[in-house]
Each structure stands twice: as structure tokens, then as C-alpha cells.
Amino acid sequence: MRDLSQLPLLLLGGLRIGAIYALSAIGLVVIHKATRTVNFAHGGFIMLGCYGAYVGVERLHIPYWTVYLVVPLAVGAFAAALEFSLLRRLRSADAFSSVITTVFISILLTELARLVFESDVLNVPTFIALPPILLRPIVLTWETVWIIVGALACGMLGAYVFARAGVGRAMRAMAASVRGAQLCGYSVDAVNAQAWLLGGALAGLAGVFVAPRFGVSPDIAFATIIPAFVAAILGGFDSLKGAILGGLLLGIVETLTAAYLSGALKNALAMLILLLVLLFKPEGLFPERRIRHV
């Protein structure tokens, strides 16, 4: 049990983990919003981002800023290749086939990582190794600043690309109406590939942020997919804004629960909140405004 004097530090810790949850959830929402696919392989993509950060920084010794650019693009390209080679063939089947395929993809990626890197937790250094900032009574590390600011900025950039940028116009059209988008000349195949590319890139980027904080291991795939889904559902599974707010809320709730109640209780409380949201507000806490077409 901690006293309330630790509350500012705990809130910062909650924002740090919440920013990662938010970035992870945005990738889930982008793919679902554009393609109506619930992607359970998202945790595997985040894990690939973690291992990409480890290989780039520790084995290839390339500049850290390059890792933040190359790894997300590589994971996004891998996700788009999976959609092209495998999931596209299942599009005419029922939704369950696509969902269960993404589950098995995640398991396959996890076991391949375990085969190549074994189950050891690998360490990745922080992006900014500078002395902490002393803001009495808070000691603020640059890692915390970078994760909160950087992950949130990247998440909001991904949301902007989908919701406002010209490159996301086809995905927005497909999200509004598949038939209408086809009548406007948009290709379903091209839009799905773009959505998986963007969603996979956001997942890979989340993995680069996760790696220094939690270490790199095959278990990251399972450890990240649950909070990503919870954050997305809390905010509203089709809401880009909701994914960010849901991730921040989940991170703060988990941190305060672990500090003031019990570390073993934090996951149970998050699931309880999720259950209550599904029962009483299934559209999420921060749903997007629906536009009625006449």
C-alpha cells in the first residue's frame, strides 16, 4: 500500500504504459475499421517489432533512430504480405475462418521466435540515455518522456493518416461502405493491403517502444494483445480517438490498482471494467459520431 504522495509518479507510470497500449490499439482499430477483420495476430506483429529492435540495435549496431523507421516498415510489409498471400484467399469464407487464421499466425510467429531466439528475455537499451530530470518530489526519466510523447505522437499520426490524410482516403471510403467505395473505383484488394500495411507498421512501432521497457521474448505477443484489445474495446472498436483514450485509461487503472490494491488484481479489474463496458455501453466509452446518409 502506497501513500498518496506517490500519486504523481504513479500517474506518470500509468501514462507511460497507457501510451504503448494506445499505439497498439490504434493498429488493431485501423485494420478492423477498413477490412472488418479482427486481427489476433497483432500481438505477434508487436513481438516482431521487439525482435527487430533487438537485432537492429544489439546485433547490427545500426543507429537507434533508423530502427524506429526501418522496423515498422518491415513489419508493415510483412503484414501486407500475409494479407496478400493468405488472408485474401479467405475473404469469401465466413468471418470465423479469418479470425482463427490470425490466431494461428500469432501462435506460429511466437513459436518461430522461440525456436530462433529461445525463451530468454533479451535486453534492449533505452533510446535516450541521459540523466533523469529532477522535479521534486518526482524523478522523471527521459525514457518515460520519450515513451509518453513519442508513442502518443506516433499513435495520433497513424490515426491522422487514416482519418484525414489523402493516402487514407480509400480506407475511409471502404470503412464507410464497401459497395460505395467500389462504385467510386477503389479496389478492395488494394485497400486491404494498405490497411494491413498501416496496422502492421503501427504494431511494429509499438514493439520498438515496448522492447526497452519490458525486454524482448516470445511471451510479448500474448502480453500485448490482451491490453491492446481491452483498450480498443474500451474506447470503441471503430474509434481511433477512443483507442488512444482507452489505452491511456487502461494504463492508469492498471498502475493505480497494482499500487494501491494488488498487483495480482490489476488484470482482473481491467477485465471487469471491460465486461461492464460490454454490458452497459457496448459501443465503447468514446465512440465515433455516426453520420447518417440520406
Image (cartoon, grey):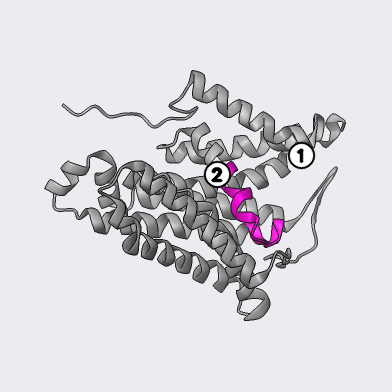
Q: Residue 2's image quarter?
A: top right
Asked whether 185 or 133 is in front, the reply is 185
Q: Residue at x 49, y 40 (%)?
A: 243
Task: Say which residue label 1 marks.
Answer: 10
Q: Secondary structure at mark 1?
A: helix
Residue 49 shows up from this direction: no
Magenta region: 210-226
Report the residue at 43% width, 27% height from top: 283
Q: Foreground residue, 29 or 88?
A: 88
Which quarter shows the N terminus?
top right
Q: Is residue 63 left or right of residue 212?
A: left
**Magenta span contains residue 215:** yes
Residue 57 location (% of width, % of height): 65, 74
Q: Residues within 10 Å of mark 2 (few under 14, many from 20)?
A: many
| Magenta-drawn stretch contains 25 | no
Left or right, 293 with reference to 33? left
Q: Are marks 2 and 1 in contact (CB under 8 Å)?
A: no
Residue 189, image x and y in percent? Answer: 25, 57
* Residue 160 spot, x, y in % from top left: 40, 49
Q: Quadrant of residue 61?
A: bottom right
Tell me residue 255's x, y (percent). 73, 38
Residue 228 got which mark? 2
Q: In the image, what residue type sits under mark 2?
A: Ala
Q: Residue at x 32, y 29 (%)?
A: 290
The residue at the point 60 percent across, 26 percent down is 273
N-terminal of the two: label 2 or label 1?
1
| Mark 1 residue crowding within 10 angstroms, few (<14) / some (14–19) / many (20+) | some
Name the main secondary structure of what is drawn in magenta. helix
**Three-letter residue code for mark 1:** Leu
